[in-house]
Amino acid sequence: MNIDVKNEKLKSWIREVAELCTPDDIYLCNGSKDEYRDMIDRLIKAGIAIPLEKRPNSYLFRSDPSDVARVEDNTYISTSSQAEAGPTNNWIAPDGLKKTMLDLYRGCMKGRTMYVIPFSMGPIGSPISKIGIEISDSPYVVVNMHIMTRVSSRVLELLGTDGDFIPCLHSVGAPLAPGQKDTKWPCAPIEKKYISHFPEENLIWSYGSGYGGNALLGKKCLALRIASAMARREGWMAEHMLILRLTSPEGKQYHIAAAFPSACGKTNLAMMQPSIAGWKCECIGDDIAWMKIGPDGRLYAINPENGFFGVAPGTSYSTNPMAMDTLKENVIFTNCALTDSGDVWWEGMDGDEPAHAIDWKGKDWTPESPADAAHANARFTAPAAQCPVICKDWEKPEGLPIDILIFGGRRTGVVPLVYEAFDWDHGVFLGATAASETTAANIGAVGNLRRDPFAMKPFCGYNMGDYFQHWFNMGEKLGSKAPRIFYVNWFRKSQDGKFLWPGFSDNSRVLKWMCERIDGRAGAQKTPIGLIPDEGSLDLGGLNISHENMKELMSINPEEWKAEIPDIEKHFSTFGNRLPEKLKKQFSEFIERLR
Ligand code: TSX
Ligand code: MN
């Protein structure tokens, strides 16, 4: 082995993996700009990265058509007992899963270079940060990790000889025979894809996919699945939440963390610019929050990531201008369309569709083509630091104090625009019952109601019943210093099928109401589901919304809510004896209030 590392655990792990996967070469990454440049240059020469004339230092990649999204059915939480993984996770016993995967890993890097990627989730050296090392045979993974995490040799220095790290092993699962020509996006067939987590030993093994959350192991695998299990053991929280700072005209700052299932516009809210005069909004993160109780007893959050890995289709100057301005340079695009002028394009972008483009599969496309030009899950990978509204304190090592937690979902009916939980425990009930109607962007039939507790269903690294209990435990520790909890639904429709709420920038009005609740300046009315804004307490100034529409938007129909009870019961019953007593109590009190 020709590479020089001082950390004993790392040294032996690299040797072990090299002997198992038998790569042609081993390369230790240092995270430098030169390294990025070199990798990109080689990918351009191989025809894998397409430089974009219109965006400096930006490149388009096209994945294999079979490798376009996270593979939830092939994702495993491998704990010694199945009960520990719980009903929301796929489970295989560690011994069996490791045996299967070792057979796949044997010789899997033949003909390839094995990259060793030292990275930090969270600012390097922050007390909340965690160090991971990803070993991967994918240069696409290396360049994306450069943007999404802090890749640096400083991480190795920090590790010293005996520091600990989270090993993240990744292979695209496509060894090359001598002389065999490589494909542009090597990967394994679906039945050989495994995204495996061993939370009892902080270990990640991913095989067969080169895409996003399957391959960039710092994100969903480490920062959510493994971190959530660590967080429970260590008394903190790893959540699927955006983080933002709202500043009032008087200059008072409020920090908000919000959890939404996919297709609810989390990245849009993270970068939202208020429509109300004098209020300012800054982005801290768009996907993951790690939260710890600080020395003053409050809950402090950091964004462990270094970039945005966002869905491109639907992103435009009208839905998210700050994201569009983030994407001007230094971006990796995946599965977007390529225009004749050397730019990327996707469905929902501003302006006219191009008369001709190359679609995400590399084929000619015109507006007459039956299929979309960009894949519905096409992505941008962009440095968070170049977002025009990134908060100047986004990398504060101690994090930022959270005042407000928000849950939400996409519901055409039943759920009002906003309501507040009576207290922390009631807020946990709201998070645990959070649900969203499926859209074309999800799997399954459009319009089905899917329970996605805390937006963590695909990301909780242990039994979700225990996760609910962990939330109650955190509430007890936080006591009167706990953030207040709210539930929102931007997507309620009128009888004639029109969105009742303008959403986007006008969501600032809802956030303002929450801030005024915190300060005791806005009134609320008790209803069976929670506290809703007093009439006149939501700032609707300058908004063209009729009194009738506002009434419909905020209406609570007890009969409709009673109709939700059987589904919540079914949802809760899946957790068996792991369902916390406190959640049963919340549920029966909810039913009682609806009587
Ligand atoms: O992201 C959204 N947000 C949050 C924004 C900060 N979207 C897009 C969701 C898909 C990812 C929304 N869509 C929001 C919203 O608040 N609201 C809606 C529904 C809606 C769509 C269009 C209009 C109004 C509401 N108006 C016109 O088209 C003019
Ligand atoms: Mn996410």
Image: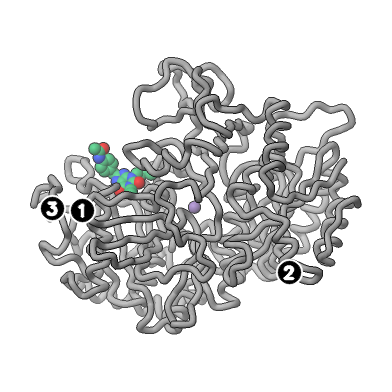
Q: Estimate how packed mark 1 is, as few (under 14), some (14 to 19) or many (20 or more) residues with alpha carbons within 10 Å.
A: few
Q: Secondary structure at mark 1?
A: loop
Which of label 1 and label 3 is nearer to you? 1
Q: Residue at x 64, y 30 (%)?
A: 49
Residue 452 in view, yes or no: no
Q: Amino acid at mark 1?
A: Ala
Q: How is the image coloured?
A: one colour
Q: Estimate how packed mark 2 is, as few (under 14), some (14 to 19) or many (20 or more) residues with alpha carbons within 10 Å.
A: some
**Residue 171 x, y percent position in the rendering:** 74, 46
Q: Residue at x 46, y 78 (%)?
A: 474
Q: Amino acid at mark 3?
A: Gly
Left or right of 449? Residue 35 is right
Q: Secondary structure at mark 2?
A: loop
In the picture of the structure, the residue carrying the numbered disc 1 is: 277
Q: Nearer the viewer, residue 399 or 172?
A: 399
Kindly identify which numbered label has been placed on residue 164: 2
Q: Residue at x 53, y 74 (%)?
A: 236
**Residue 298 x, y percent position in the rendering:** 42, 78
